[in-house]
Amino acid sequence: MRYFVIKEDKSAGYTGFVDAANKWMLPGILNCPVCKATWGGGFSYPCVDLTPVAALADFEKARPEPIEEYERLCELIRPLLPPGARLQPGSEFGPSIGKAQGRFGSFVMNYSWILMVQREALEKLQAESLRGLKGCRVQVRFRQRNSPELFELEILPMGRLHRDCLPPDYQPPCSRCGRGFVPLPDDFLLDATTLPRDMDLFRLEDFSQVIVCTKRFADASKRLGLDGVVFQPLPVK
């Protein structure tokens, strides 16, 4: 199986920009008792609906909390997550809400860790029977007429980078809060033993800003003439 990292095609000339945030979020962690870090920056699950949670107000404001409170909130929402989902401090849920403007391609990638797609493009991809392809409609206000209908793809964390592309002094994530201390390497090398066999689109567990797809996804996108992103080959070991 061949894999590709998905990045914004900055040469395409599109001017579109989405300024939005997911409806709910987990708090960050305040002063982890093991690594002493205060941090947040988790995964995004736009298709996860938290309305069944009684204490919904606990998920409406970004803030750091002691790790015991963070862990309590994780258990409240864990049953609502899709299979294979992982939680980290600052993980976000529900549709993105905000505003947008400009001209958009088939794919929209304002930030490296968020991949949106226009409705027509999503329907074409789903007709290709690609595995793990699910999107949630983005709730944004547009400044122009004839605005596109955008969907944020829910991309599960499934694979990891190989140890050989990480620094020699690499230290594993904190045993309590899960925070890693390794900067994103310049050259990626995927760890074959960690890659999913039933997903054509996923993000890395250890570097969530890296979105990866299979050759099936890349080939289908190119054949359908979908633009807005580029696919760069990734080595696997």
Image (spheres, rainbow, N blue to C red):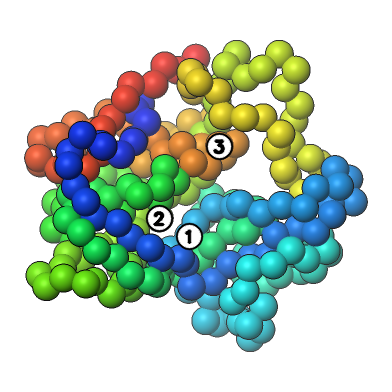
Residue at left offset 48%, top offset 60%: 45
Residue at left offset 54%, top offset 62%: 92
Residue 70 placed where, x, y %? 75, 64
Say which residue label 2 marks.
154
Residue 197 placed where, x, y %? 42, 34
User: Along the line of sight, which residue is nearer the eye, 226 or 17?
Assistant: 17
Residue at left offset 10%, top offset 35%: 223
Residue 74 placed where, x, y %? 69, 65
Residue type indicated by callout 1 = Tyr
Look at the picture and state if 84 lies above or below 18: above
Q: Looking at this rendering, what residue extends furthest in the right direction?
A: 33
Q: Earlier in the sequence, mark 2 or mark 3?
A: 2
Tell whether 237 sits left or right of 198.
right
Say which residue label 3 marks.
207
Residue type indicated by callout 3 = Phe
- Circle 2/circle 3 CB separation < 8 Å: no
Callout 1: SS: strand
Say which residue label 1 marks.
45
Q: Residues within 10 Å of mark 3 (few under 14, many from 20)?
A: some
Residue type indicated by callout 2 = Glu
Residue 206 visible in the picture: yes
- For the residues labelled 1 and 3, the Cα–Cα distance comes to 16 Å
Residue 125 visible in the picture: no
- Circle 1/circle 3 CB separation < 8 Å: no
Tell whether 181 sits left or right of 7.
right
Q: Quadrant of residue 34?
A: top right
Q: Looking at this rendering, what residue extends furthest in the bottom direction?
A: 54
Look at the picture and state if 139 lies above or below 201: below
Q: Earlier in the sequence, mark 1 or mark 3?
A: 1
